[in-house]
């Protein structure tokens, strides 16, 4: 929405800005593609000096098009000193052209020909051709560097032409092909040339001011003939004529000016020639009026009209009111009273020592840019249209432009409001749809509190996928609504402290808060047994599938790390083999102490942390899979509470990969430890296997990431950590109010926005984990985005308007693997693959 407003505002600013400085053609807006890519220019209007083959004829020289052999190509190689070849476009009428675009021949990867440079020639009548030059006099335009990118170049100054030729230029003998587009708008003035005395130089005490027409494209000998130039370039001069709108221009650049002393008759005569006979309503002359420097608008103008080949006897005379109060440059409008003419000669009488013009425009018959027209047939007597005197009168047509602008602005504002309202309604509809969708899928799921791990006690029920409905409020995206995970998070905090179950009856199936489901064996069919008061039951040992290990048999060796609950120690556990009673096979002799990892709850932990710790024990105690870290025992009869897990020699996967490099030259040179691609896939497939097991039990992990996977010997991987945050990677979590955290960079859009956690959202996190692995954990996901931008991006996934940003394909990652990642991030959770599928695909990727 912000973007939309910005664009609108920009549009308004442009409109207002140019409205203030330009008359009819506004070079800032006149940038429409003229029909090469859009097809409005007919094939027969595109011609060329030659063609390589029928399939590279001129008509294939359309920007964006891939038809034929993909571009226009001349018959012979273009040589540096030979400028014979050209691609010509006939626009059928005069156009104001501000921009040109070129492209080479790509032809779906087969072609590789392009023009490094080109020149432009143009003509208004098809016979006199003019070479375009930029404001510094340079003709050559730098163009393409490859066959596919479009290179756009502003034409400064713009050109007014009907025919345009692109002439490829090379610095060495080269095969060249081109596709082109012209951008601009129709030239409604119909003016094909003005003939005027050459502009003069004014000598101010501090600097010379050059008032010549520096971009005039006709002949300049004693006077200027047959050309157009600064008086028609769409740029109006400033009040202070020594300054210019054009970057790096010399003093007086925007104006053409004459000194009274050089004109004994007291006037400057300019003849205007048009493309055909037109019915003229007005002429607007943009004049400087810096009277303190003896510059004023003309005091009188006398215009003669030529229809066919005869000049009318009676001229039209107009005397504007001279203004010595306002030094602003202004348009003086002369009412041409519907004179029919194909040429007009006007004598502009000096009002002071100097007369400086920067633009002259004509309004005629249908070629009116503004809306009202005088009746064409009745010719009124020369109307003395008063000059615009900003302090006294407002010029009639300027009023019309102003009203037009205001109406346009009102329309745009109304459109903005309508769009905003429409979007809000649309969002509401989407929200409802999402809610409905969510409700549908909630048929056999639980209302779950904020623990990181959840369980659906009804695996055989209606629900197609296990789901944990987080304690977050359902927050719907868009605008400020979804920027408030603080609301979510703070509510998750309160939810954690709730000890009573929330019971939701849906489809006749009772649903309970996950925290209250203790007896997993109690799930049969649609019956769910729930036992509240987790802690009590855990301590009574009723629902813990592991036994109390004698604490005195643990010998501290070293600290392995620190997590959410407290420190993790490496310990020797005496008698562990007997304790496990062959339930778990250790790869060391029976009489030797076993190395174990002991996770301890910190002494200052509050009741919530203690409950979470016990919940993790409860969950882990039931998980038995080669790719899930195994809980061997607990010490919960006394403080500090401990969980004893198998020891994974290489720590967590994130740290492990960060210490390694991909195989290759670089690693060889730096002597770094490496991991092969096949071992990366091996590790990824083990995670997929562990997740396959979890999903088969309808468990949702909710925090899958490399930091939560442990690495043992020989690249063995086990999923661990069913707690949410840990200090080491606090940057990976989104912290709000200094308390609760969410791993938003790993979370699916629906988890963030709808608080919906499912196996499918675990699959999303798996895709991100895979991405981390392929990047050797050298970069955080979406590292270039702030947390807020990540959440905004989540909104884009929800809106699905192709504006969402996906994690990029890692350098090491083959297309097939990236496709797998992308499939994990599909918007529709149901379309994401199952872990079984992913596991299989990853096994196949290993050689
Ligand atoms: P946690 O509290 O689970 O987040 O663990 C904190 C850190 O301790 C992890 O990042 C690992 O580096 C380390 N750690 C935890 N469990 C084990 C284990 N079973 N074997 C080896 N290192 C571990």
Image (tube, helix red, strand yellow):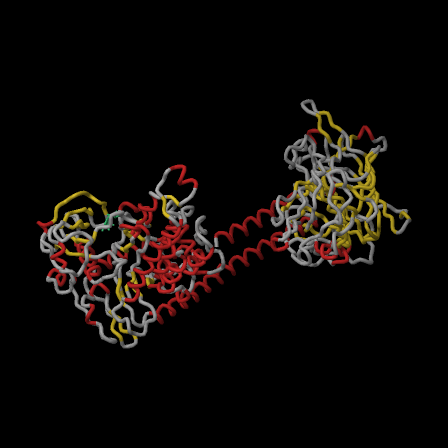
Number of marks drawn: 0
Q: Quadrant of the C terminus?
A: bottom left
Question: Relative to residue 53, is residue 155 depicted above or below?
Answer: above
- Residue at point 76% right, 44% down? 121
On the picture, is 107 further left or further right than 835? right
- Residue at point 18% right, 68% down? 519
Please identify the quarter of the rendering in which residue 534 is found. Answer: bottom left
x and y percentages locating residue 745 in the rendered image: 37, 52
Please identify the quarter of the rendering in which residue 681 is found. Answer: bottom left
x and y percentages locating residue 400 in the rendered image: 67, 52
Residue 386 in sight here:
no
Question: Relative to residue 257, is residue 616 depicted above or below?
Answer: below
Looking at the image, the residue that sits furthest to the top is 205
In front of the other: 614 or 294: 614
In front of the other: 846 or 253: 846
On the picture, is 812 further left or further right than 712? right
x and y percentages locating residue 691 in the rendered image: 31, 61
């Amino acid at each position: 929405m912000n973007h939309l407003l910005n664009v609108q505002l920009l549009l308004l600013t442009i409109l207002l800005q140019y409205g203030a400085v330009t008359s009819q053609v506004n070079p800032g807006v006149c940038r429409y593609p003229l029909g090469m890519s859009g097809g409005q220019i007919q094939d027969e209007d595109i011609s060329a000096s030659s063609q390589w083959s029928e399939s590279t004829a001129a008509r294939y020289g359309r920007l964006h098009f891939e038809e034929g052999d993909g571009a226009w190509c001349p018959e012979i190689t273009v040589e540096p000193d030979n400028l014979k070849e050209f691609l010509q476009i006939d626009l059928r009428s005069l156009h104001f052209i501000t921009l040109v675009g070129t492209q080479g021949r790509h032809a779906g990867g087969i072609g590789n020909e392009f023009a490094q440079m080109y020149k432009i020639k143009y003509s208004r009548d098809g016979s006199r051709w003019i070479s375009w030059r930029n404001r510094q006099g340079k003709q050559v335009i730098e163009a393409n560097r490859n066959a596919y990118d479009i290179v756009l170049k502003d034409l400064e100054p713009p050109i007014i032409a009907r025919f345009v030729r692109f002439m490829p230029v090379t610095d060495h003998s080269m095969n060249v092909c081109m596709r082109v587009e012209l951008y601009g708008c129709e030239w409604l003035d119909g003016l094909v040339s003005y003939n005027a005395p050459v502009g003069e130089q004014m000598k101010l005490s501090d600097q010379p001011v050059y008032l010549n027409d520096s971009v005039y494209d006709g002949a300049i000998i004693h006077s200027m003939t047959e050309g157009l130039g600064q008086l028609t370039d769409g740029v109006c001069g400033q009040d202070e004529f020594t300054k210019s709108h054009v970057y790096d221009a010399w003093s007086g650049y925007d104006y053409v000016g004459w000194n009274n002393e050089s004109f004994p008759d007291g006037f400057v005569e300019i003849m205007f020639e048009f493309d055909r006979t037109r019915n003229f309503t007005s002429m607007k002359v943009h004049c400087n009026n810096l009277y303190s420097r003896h510059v004023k608008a003309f005091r009188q103008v006398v215009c003669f009209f030529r229809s066919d080949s005869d000049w009318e006897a009676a001229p039209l005379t107009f005397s504007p009111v001279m203004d010595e109060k306002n030094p602003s440059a202004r348009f003086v409008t002369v009412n041409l009273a519907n004179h029919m003419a194909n040429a007009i000669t006007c004598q502009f009488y000096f009002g002071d020592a100097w007369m400086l013009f920067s633009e002259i425009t004509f309004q005629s018959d249908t070629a009116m840019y503004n809306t009202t027209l005088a009746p064409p047939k009745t010719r009124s007597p020369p109307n003395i249209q008063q000059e615009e005197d900003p302090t006294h009168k407002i010029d009639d047509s300027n009023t019309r432009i102003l009203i037009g602008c205001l109406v346009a602005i009102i329309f745009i504002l109304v459109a903005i409001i309508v769009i905003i309202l429409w979007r809000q309604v649309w969002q509401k509809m989407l929200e409802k749809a999402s809610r409905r969708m969510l409700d549908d899928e909630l048929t056999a799921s639980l209302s779950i509190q904020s623990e990181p791990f959840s369980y659906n006690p009804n695996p055989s029920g209606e629900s197609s996928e296990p789901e944990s409905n987080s304690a977050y409020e359902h927050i719907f995206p868009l605008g400020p609504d979804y920027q408030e995970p603080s609301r979510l998070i703070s509510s998750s905090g309160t939810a954690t402290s709730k000890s009573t179950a929330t019971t939701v009856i849906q489809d006749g199936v009772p649903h309970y808060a996950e925290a209250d489901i203790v007896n997993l064996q109690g799930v049969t069919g649609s019956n769910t047994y729930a036992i509240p008061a987790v802690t009590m039951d855990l301590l009574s040992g009723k629902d813990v599938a592991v036994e109390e290990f004698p604490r005195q048999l643990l010998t501290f060796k070293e600290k392995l790390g620190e997590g959410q609950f407290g420190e993790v120690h490496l310990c020797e556990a005496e008698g562990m083999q007997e304790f496990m009673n062959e339930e778990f096979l250790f790869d060391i002799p029976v009489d030797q102490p076993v190395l174990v990892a002991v996770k301890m709850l910190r002494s200052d932990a509050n009741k919530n942390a203690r409950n979470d710790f016990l919940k993790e024990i409860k969950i882990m105690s039931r998980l038995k899979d080669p790719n899930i870290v195994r809980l061997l025992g607990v010490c919960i009869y006394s403080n500090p509470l401990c969980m004893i897990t198998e020891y994974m020699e290489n720590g967590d996967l994130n740290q492990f990969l960060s210490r390694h490099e991909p195989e290759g030259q670089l690693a060889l040179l730096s002597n770094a430890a490496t991991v092969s691609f096949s071992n990366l896939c091996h590790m990824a497939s083990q995670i997929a296997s562990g997740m396959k097991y979890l999903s088969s039990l309808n468990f949702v992990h909710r925090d899958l990431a490399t930091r939560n996977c442990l690495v043992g010997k020989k690249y063995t991987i086990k999923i661990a950590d069913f707690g949410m945050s840990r200090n080491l990677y606090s940057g990976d979590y989104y912290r709000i109010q200094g308390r609760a955290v969410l791993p938003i960079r790993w979370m699916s859009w629906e988890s963030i926005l709808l608080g919906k956690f499912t196996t499918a959202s675990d699959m999303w996190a798996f895709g991100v984990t895979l991405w981390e692995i392929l990047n050797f954990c050298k970069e955080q996901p979406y590292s270039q985005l702030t947390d807020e931008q990540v959440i905004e991006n989540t909104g884009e996934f929800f809106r699905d308007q192709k504006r969402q940003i996906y994690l990029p394909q890692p350098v090491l990652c083959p297309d097939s693997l990236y496709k797998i990642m992308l499939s994990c991030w599909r918007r529709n959770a149901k379309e994401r693959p199952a872990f079984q599928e992913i596991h299989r695909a990853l096994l196949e990727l290993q050689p």
